Structures are given as C-alpha cells and as structure tokens.
Image: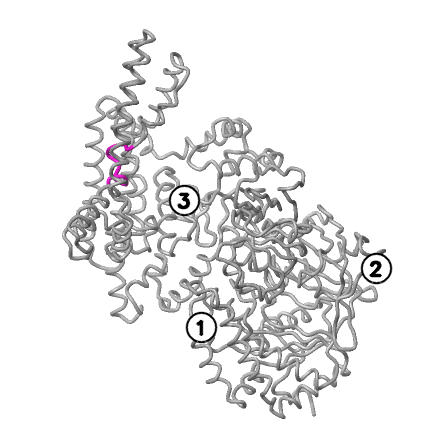
C-alpha cells in the first residue's frame, strides 16, 4: 500500500496549518515545526475523520449526547457535582473501550507504524478545540508513553479518543463556555525519545508575563515527572535579547520517569544526581536559540516540551502560551520601556472588561480630548491610550522619566488607589536607569506643548477658574449651578436623540461628538465645587496650630448632603421601610418602585460601560435588593445610621470650633468652621458628574438600540442588543455584522475570565498587586516557595492527598497538597488558592491555576504537614509566600 492512499492517517512531515481540522492543534504544530527545520521526532497523525468514523460505526453520538444532558452549570453545582461528571465520563470511557476500530482505520495505522519501524512510541491526543487563542487545555487530554506493538497502539488511540470526554476536559469546557458539539480528536504517534533529561521551555515568562524573558525547567528522565508536578525541576530565567542567564535555581530532584517493559514508571534519582544541574550553560543557550526559532515561526510565545538524548535536543510539542495577559495595543516599537496603568481598575475600580462599544466610547473620549487640546491633531489612534483584554490602559511613562516628578509621587502619593500608586512607584524605582536614559529635554517638551496648544484650552481654563471661584464665594449657589448644568447637559443629549434620524447621523454623533462633550462637559459639573477638595486639609493645618488631636475631623466626612449616591441608598431604604410597614410586595408596578427606577434606573453595576444594561432594562436586581432588605429587617438601622452620621458631623464642627476658641484663636476658629461647613455643603457633589454621565449613557444606549433595531430589520443583526458587541467603525462597515458580533462575544467572554493587572509594561510584565511584600525569614507561621500564579488571597486551609477527597473541599478554601496532576482539575473550580509541595511554574497545577485566575505557590516544603485544616492563611502568588494569619 502506498502512503498517498492513506485516508485516516498522515505523516507529520506532510501536515501543515491547513490540516488543523483533521490533525488537531498538536499535530498541526508539529508538522509546521518540521517544515521550519526544527528537530522533531518522526511520527504520524491519526486524523479526526478516523475519530468520527469510529463514533459513527459504534453508534456512540446519541449515547454521548444523552449522557451529557445531565451536566449543568458547574459554578452552581452542589458538593457532588464533580463526582457526577466523573460518573458520566466513566460511562463514556466504557463506550469507547467496548467499541471496535473499523478495519480500514486499523490498516492505515498499521501501515504508518511499520514506516516507523514499529518502534516504541508516544501517543498523544490532538484535539481541534485545543490550543486555540484564549483556551489552553494544559494536560486535559491523555498521553501514553513507551507504547510498543500494534495491539497496545490501537488501545492507546482509543484511550486518547475517549479522553476527549474525561472529567477534567468536560469540567474545563463548561468553565470556558466551550460547546461539546462537533468536537473531534486527532492522535499524534511519535517515536519515543528515551530521554536522559527533559523539560519545558516557555518562550515568555509565564509568572511575570515578560516577553523579553524565557523560563526553562529541566529534570532527569522523561518529562512526565515535571508535567505532573511530581518533581521540583531545575529552573532558569533567560534574557532573550542579550542571550544571558538572569536566574538559576538547581533543585533537589528526587524522582524521575523512565521506560519499563509495561510503559513508564517513577524511580528514585541517584543521590549523586539529585542536586546536580541537569543542563550546563551551553545547553541552556542552545534551548534558548531553539525557543527563539519556534516563537518566531509561530509569531507568538510558545510552551515547548523538549527531550535530550545522545547529545541532541528534540522538540516533542509546542503550543501557544494562553495564560499570558495580552500586550496592550497598538504596540510601541523602539521607544524603550513603557509603563501602562489599567484605567478600568484605577479610575473606575472595575475589574471587568468593557464591552466592545463601551471600550470604543472611552477611547473616543480620549481622542476627543486630544483633538480639543492639540490644534495640529489629525484623527488617528491616540498613542497613549491602549487596549488589552477588553480593558483600557494609559501610557504614563513620559512624566516619570524625570526624577523630580518621581520624587513628588513618592512624597505625595494619590489616595484614590494607593495600591496601584505604590506598585507604580516600585516599578519606577526598579527601572529607574532605563527610564532616565530615554528622557527628552523638559524645555523641548514644554515648547512642543505650547506651540501645539489649541487656543480653546486657554478659554476653557479661564471659564473653569471662574466656576471654581464662584464656588468659593457662594457655596450654596454653586451646588445649585452644578445640578442645573448637569440637567441642561442631559437635556441637550435628549434633544440630539430627537433630531438625529439616519444611522449615519446617529453614529457620527455617538462616536465623534458625544465623547468629547461627555468628557469635557461633565467635568464642568464639579468645577463649581472643586475647591472643597482642599478644605479638610486646610482646616487640619489650622487645627494643628492649636490642638494636639485632630481625629474628630473624620466625623465631618460622615453623611454629607448633596451626594446622589448616598441619597439613592437612603431613598431605597425609605421605600423598603414603607413596604415593610404596609406589608406590601415590591413589584414593578408599585408606585414607589416606579418612582425609584424613573430617578435612578439609568444606573447599573457596571454603569460606565455603555454596553451594559441599565436597571430600568433589567430591574430584577432592584427588586431583589428590596426583598433582601425587607427580609433582613435592617432598613431602620441603615436610616438611623445616616441620621446619626449627620448629627455626629454637626457636633464635631461645633466641638472643633469651640476648642479653637478656647485657645483664644477666634479668627482661626471662624476660618475652620467656614471651611468645614462649606466642605459638607459642596463635597457630596463629587458624585454628580458620574450620575449625569450614566444618565447620558442611558440616552446613548437608546440611540444605539434604535440603530440595532434598524439593522435587525435589514437582516444584518440577529438581535438589536447585538449592537453593543460592535465598535463604531464596525457598525458603519459593509462587513457581515453577525459574524463580527459572534467573534466579539467570544472575545468578551474570554476577557471576562481574565484577571487584569494593575500595571503593565511594554515587555509584558504584569503586576496584579503591590510589589512591596516583606519577604521575611521562613518560620513557624511564614513559609516561602515559588511564585507560580499571581494574586493574593486569604482563606481557610484544606489539606488533601488525593483528588477523590474533593468532597471535603468547600468553595473558596485554599487547597494544600503535595502536587497536582490533571485529575485534580475539576476541584480548581471551587478553590480560592493553591499551595503545593512540589512542582514549578509550568507544572500542571501552576498552569491551570493561572488559567483559572487562582493565586498559587509551589515548592513549599512539607506544606501538607506544616499547614493544618481550618487555618486562615494569606498566599501571595507573586512573592511565593504563605503566611498563617489565624490558627
């Protein structure tokens, strides 16, 4: 039989990216790597049509569908949900075991196996849903090593097919919202490299996200001990650009995987080799060069498994690293190090991503500001505004190239988000030399700003100063002016909504006109009362001249009037009180509920995102809130607490004033009293711009839904609300909008599952919390391991030795164990954090923890005996520390 007559198999050297749907991710990547001239062991792929033929020939499709109908959303499952999935998986596995591979498929497999000389082989799953952008299956499917003989090969192929339905793969697909329909498995069969040593190479550092570093792990024998987390491997961090080793950790490697007559086994490493380095410097550099070639070929960071035998390295598989947070776009080239701040988190305390239309709106706001400020501005992307993972990032690099500004930030850190600012300060300190060497002349920058400044800016500054001074002179009138300005602003948008008729007119207004109006106009609401932001500090300075204790000032900030957010809460509690006393049910038709939604229905949980529904669209949240307050009977407490706060604030002002008068400083006492009373009068208005912004967004949403309705009538959208999954340029394009919506919805769901960093750099370094965690000496309540998945988490310990003990695990607990393999994966849906005795950043548990956003620490010696069930601990997945807070 000739090789070109094979229908169900294909030699790896003949596989290209065009064969993805037949060869699966793993098989396709190996074929492409052979094309690139990389050292890949010989082998072939059992194509996905063989899987489909097997399923059809054994009538498995309907049986599998019936079994899967019992699986519900895992996030809301009871304690036995994972055992339920395990039972279903076992039933499907038995169906595959009982099935017969058709003769023509057997014939094709045998032919290709003969070509390999019927050598010992590795048999690996290669799925079409695997290694796609945004998904990373990290050992979800099965691999079989040292398979010898046709009978064992046929069995291993069936076992790989069945692994498409194992419990860990099923639970992963539910978590990632991946459908179970239409899936198929390819199977890669390769000559087994009887490795003297093996490991994994990440061509970007998966722990800190840096694309200019590689992370390499290595241990003795075959690679299963590393992937399964059975051994803590040697580790190197390398500088890709300068080709040098940055860090080296030689571990104690007690176990290794070797071949035996029946497959593989774990054996003890000789005492001599346990603490010996597995790779010398030349070998480390050789792997760096290979990794560089693979990354350049695939144009993305790669997770590569390698093996070494008789003086030669072999690459046995490669897949994209999908746990990295994406680089902010558009990328900066040849500008040196850039620092990006997460606007969603810093400005809006919003960990979630924007919808496509929400992101577009905020980016257009920044475009609008640039256009107003810079008279030479031409419409183009603003280079200091970036997108990554559905979040908006702002490039804050330039000011911090100057030591004076760096020092000012350290001495006067902003109080809006101290964690982000502290993180920024430490990042600047760490990269001080790099930042300073690329700075421009301050005079040159200033001259450039002045020459390009739009005259409108001067006019804006003058009118703004007038509003500020108005507030200083007439605080009460200034408050009224703020409300009046906001109401007029919203009315102008309402009028625009009535005037604009065509899709083109509406989109032009929403995309090009409204963003700058919103950004600039709504700032003016707060200008009238902005002086009040300094009043407490000024009062405190005067008080310190006469009083030792200024702590009573804290009470002045309680229950400030004119705060729309506080007023909303009080109105809601008032409604609850009335309903409870009258024993009435909260319904959408109830006058009190109607009035509340008329006034506040434009708000929502993610209200700065134009694409998120408002309360008046989905009012069930408000009804649930009212019902919970009625049920808990805590409305009186909330109302009384607010009134008590007002009383305490008034008493504090009187007390402070009298104490200063008692010191004989009557003039200062009057100054302080005026500052404090004006502060209370004006400071609540700080919530008003956002109130009117979200009110405006409500009107713009209605305009967009009108456009969506029209596009639906034209057959270009399935639903009018799909408009919120399009960017402005996409709405006006001639492309298939339904296809764009589907892709954008998928990306939005992936972005939702990503934990976004506070700060990023152009190297990809991603920082999720303040860097300055004191790393003290290891002791009775403080343990140090390897940082393998970022984040800080506090929770109760649950020590488990086997995944079958998972019923003992409660949602949010910290799982402490020796190490994890793929069988533990379903439990990752429940845990809040992970601590392992063995493993490294690229062992299974670490990879899956990063994918699920679970903070994790590995390599903590004797963690399962040192840590006890029920202890409250804090784990830091960025410093590698585990601290016992409470026994």
Asked if marks 1 and 3 touch (Cβ < 8 Å), the reply is: no
Q: Is residue 692 magenta?
A: no
Q: Along the line of sight, which residue is nearer the eye, 526 or 138?
A: 138
**Residue 270: mark in rendering:** 2
Q: CA distance from mark 1 to mark 2?
A: 47 Å
Question: Does any portion of residue 256 appear in the rendered image?
Answer: yes
Residue in the image at 67% along x and 49% along y: 241
Q: Which residue is mark 1?
A: 71
Disc 2 element? loop
Q: Along the line of sight, which residue is nearer the eye, 366 or 619?
A: 619
- Residue 590, how many percent across, how many down? 15, 54
Q: CA distance from mark 3 to mark 2?
A: 53 Å
Vertical arrangement, residue 164 with respect to residue 789, above or below: below
Magenta segment boundaries in residue numbering: 559-567
Q: Which residue is mark 3?
A: 349
- Residue 246, how many percent across, how many down? 71, 46
User: Horizontally, is 854 left or right of 731 in the view?
Assistant: right
Q: CA distance from mark 1 to mark 3?
A: 35 Å
Asked if marks 3 and 2 touch (Cβ < 8 Å), the reply is: no
Disc 3 element? loop
Vertical arrangement, residue 187 with respect to residue 785, above or below: below
For the C terminus, the image quarter is: top right
Q: Earlier in the sequence, mark 1 or mark 3?
A: 1
């Amino acid at each position: 039989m000739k090789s070109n007559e094979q229908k169900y198999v294909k030699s790896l050297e003949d596989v290209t990216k065009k064969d993805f749907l037949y060869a699966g991710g793993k098989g396709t990547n190996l074929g492409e790597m052979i094309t690139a001239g990389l050292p890949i062991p010989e082998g072939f792929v059992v194509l996905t049509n063989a899987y489909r033929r097997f399923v059809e020939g054994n009538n498995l499709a309907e049986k599998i569908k019936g079994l899967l109908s019992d699986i519900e959303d895992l996030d809301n499952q009871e304690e036995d949900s994972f055992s339920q999935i395990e039972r279903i998986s076992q039933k499907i596995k038995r169906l595959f075991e009982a099935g017969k591979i058709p003769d023509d498929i057997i014939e094709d497999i045998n032919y290709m196996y003969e070509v390999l000389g019927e050598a010992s082989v590795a048999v690996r799953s290669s799925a079409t849903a695997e290694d796609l952008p945004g998904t990373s299956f990290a050992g979800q499917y099965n691999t079989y090593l040292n398979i010898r003989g046709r009978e064992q090969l046929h069995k291993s192929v069936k076992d790989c097919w069945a692994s498409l339905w194992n419990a860990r793969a099923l639970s992963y697909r539910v978590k990632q919202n991946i459908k179970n329909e239409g899936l198929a498995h390819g199977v890669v069969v390769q000559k087994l490299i009887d490795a003297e040593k093996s490991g994994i190479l990440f061509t970007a550092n998966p722990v800190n996200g840096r694309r200019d570093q590689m992370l390499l792990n290595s241990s003795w024998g075959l690679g299963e001990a590393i992937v399964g987390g059975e051994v803590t491997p040697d580790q190197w961090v390398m500088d890709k650009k300068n080709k040098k080793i940055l860090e080296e950790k030689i571990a104690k490697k007690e176990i290794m995987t070797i071949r035996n007559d029946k497959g593989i086994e774990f054996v003890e490493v000789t005492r001599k080799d346990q603490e010996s380095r597995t790779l010398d410097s030349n070998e480390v550099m050789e792997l760096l060069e290979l990794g560089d070639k693979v990354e350049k070929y695939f144009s993305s960071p790669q997770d590569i498994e390698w093996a070494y035998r008789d003086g030669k390295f072999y690459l046995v598989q490669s897949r994209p690293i999908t746990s990295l947070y994406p680089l902010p776009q558009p990328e900066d080239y040849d500008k040196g190090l850039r620092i990006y701040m997460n606007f969603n988190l810093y400005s809006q305390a919003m960990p979630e991503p924007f919808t496509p239309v929400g992101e577009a709106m905020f980016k257009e706001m920044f475009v609008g500001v640039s256009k107003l400020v810079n008279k030479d501005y031409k419409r183009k992307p603003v280079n200091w505004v970036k997108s990554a993972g559905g979040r908006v990032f702002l490039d804050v690099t330039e000011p911090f190239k100057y030591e004076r500004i760096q020092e000012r930030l350290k001495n006067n850190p902003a109080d809006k988000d101290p964690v982000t600012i502290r993180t920024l300060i430490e990042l600047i300190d760490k990269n001080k030399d790099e930042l300073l060497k690329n700075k421009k002349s301050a005079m040159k920058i200033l001259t450039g700003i002045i020459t390009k400044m739009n005259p409108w800016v001067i006019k804006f500054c003058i009118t703004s100063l007038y509003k500020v001074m108005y507030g200083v002179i007439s605080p009460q009138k200034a408050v009224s002016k703020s409300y009046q300005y906001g109401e007029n602003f919203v009315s102008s948008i309402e009028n625009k909504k009535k005037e604009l008729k065509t899709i083109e007119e509406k989109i032009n207004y929403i995309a090009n006109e409204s963003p700058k109006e919103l950004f600039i106009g709504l700032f003016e609401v707060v200008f009238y009362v902005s002086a009040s932001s300094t009043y407490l500090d000024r009062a405190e300075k005067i008080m310190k001249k006469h009083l030792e204790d200024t702590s009573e000032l804290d009470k002045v900030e309680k229950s400030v009037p004119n705060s729309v957010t506080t007023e909303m809460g009080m109105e809601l509690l008032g409604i609850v009180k009335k309903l409870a006393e009258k024993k009435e049910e909260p319904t959408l038709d109830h006058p009190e509920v109607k009035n509340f939604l008329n006034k506040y229905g434009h708000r929502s949980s993610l209200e700065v995102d134009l694409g998120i529904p408002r309360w008046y669209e989905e009012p069930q949240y408000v009804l649930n809130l009212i019902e919970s307050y009625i049920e808990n009977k805590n409305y009186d407490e909330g109302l009384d607490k607010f009134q008590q706060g007002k009383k305490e604030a008034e008493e504090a002002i009187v007390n402070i004033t009298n104490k200063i008068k008692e010191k004989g400083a009557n003039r200062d006492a009057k100054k302080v009293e005026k500052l404090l009373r004006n502060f209370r009068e004006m400071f609540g208005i700080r919530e008003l711009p956002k109130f009117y912004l979200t009110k405006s967004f409500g009107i713009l949403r209605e305009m967009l839904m009108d456009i969506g309705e029209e596009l639906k009538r034209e057959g270009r959208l399935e639903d009018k609300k799909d408009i919120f999954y399009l960017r402005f340029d996409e709405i006006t394009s001639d492309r298939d909008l339904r296809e764009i919506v589907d892709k954008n919805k998928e990306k939005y769901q992936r972005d939702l599952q990503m934990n976004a960093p506070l700060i990023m750099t152009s190297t990809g370094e991603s920082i999720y919390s303040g860097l300055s965690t004191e790393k003290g000496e290891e002791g009775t309540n403080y343990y140090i391991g390897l940082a393998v998945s970022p984040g800080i988490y506090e929770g109760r310990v649950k020590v488990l030795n086997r995944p079958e003990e998972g019923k003992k695990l409660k949602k949010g607990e910290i799982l402490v164990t020796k190490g994890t393999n793929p069988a533990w994966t379903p439990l990752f849906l429940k845990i809040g954090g992970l601590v392992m005795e063995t493993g490294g950043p690229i062992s299974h548990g670490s990879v899956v923890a990063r994918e699920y956003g679970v903070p994790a620490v590995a390599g903590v010696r004797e963690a399962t005996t040192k840590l006890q069930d029920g202890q409250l601990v804090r784990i830091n997945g960025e410093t590698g520390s585990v601290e016992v807070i409470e026994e």
